[in-house]
Amino acid sequence: MPKGEGKLVAQNKKANHDYFIEETYEAGIVLQGTEIKAIRAGRVNLKESYARIINGEVFLLGMHISPYEQGNRYNHDPLRTRKLLLHRKQINKLIGETKEVGYALVPLKIYFKNGYAKVLIGLGKGKKNYDKRETLKRKEANRSIERALRERQKM
C-alpha cells in the first residue's frame, strides 16, 4: 500500500495552501490511553500542528485530539506533544533538510493502515503571498475549464 493510503481520519488542507510540499514521510504515532479511540471516532484536528526534531527524535506539536467521551479520569491531555516513529536514516535526512531556511515539517493527514494510526508528514517550503494567489488563480482557471467542458458535453 503506498504512502498516504488507508482509512483517512483527518487532513490538513491548509498545509498545501501555505507550503510547497517537496517530500512526504509516513510515521507512526506514540499514543496514550484513550487517544486511539478518539482518533477512530474522528475527533482530531491538524490545523495548527507542526513537527519538530528535538534531540534526534521527531515530535508532533499542536495536534488536538479531543478527550474520549466514554473515557474515565485517565483521559489524555488534548494538546500534548506526541512522538513520531521514523527510521534513523529518515530522521538524519530530515535534520539536514530542515536546517535550511524556509523549510518546515508539516503533518498532512492522519489515517489508519493495517490497524495502526499513521501520520503523513511533509517537508514543506513556505509560500509567499504571491505564490498563494497564483495557486488560487490556477485552481479557479481549472474549475472554469471543467465547467465549460461539462456544459459542452450536455449539448
Image: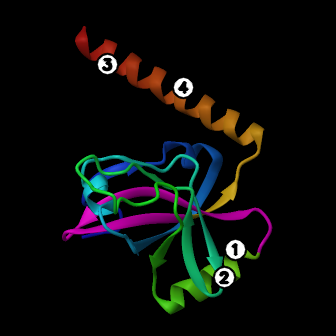
Type of the residue with mark 1: Thr
Disc 3 target residue: 150
**N-terminal-most mark, 2 or 3:** 2
- Decide: marks 1, 4 in contact (CB < 8 A)? no
Which quadrant of the view contains residue 56?
bottom right
Q: CA distance from mark 3 to mark 1?
A: 44 Å
Q: Is residue 114 above or below residue 106?
A: below
Asked whether, in this view, residue 129 is left or right of residue 66, the answer is right
Visible in this render: residue 5? no
Q: Which sits in the foreground, 20 or 86?
A: 86
Percent coordinates x, y for residue 98 in the rendering = 69, 73
User: Observer-nearest residue: 22 or 111?
Assistant: 111
The mark found on residue 27 in the picture is: none
Instruction: Please state which of residues 5 and 85 is positioned toward the viewer in this rendering.
Output: 85
Any mark on residue 95, and which? 2
Mark 2 vs mark 4, foreground winner is: 2
The residue drawn where x is 62% and y is 54% is: 20
Identify the residue shown where x is 30% and y is 47%: 42
Q: Are marks 4 and 3 in contact (CB under 8 Å)?
A: no
Disc sitting over residue 98 in the figure: 1
- Amino acid marked by disc 3: Arg
For mark 4, what is the residue? Answer: 140
Q: Earlier in the sequence, mark 2 or mark 4?
A: 2
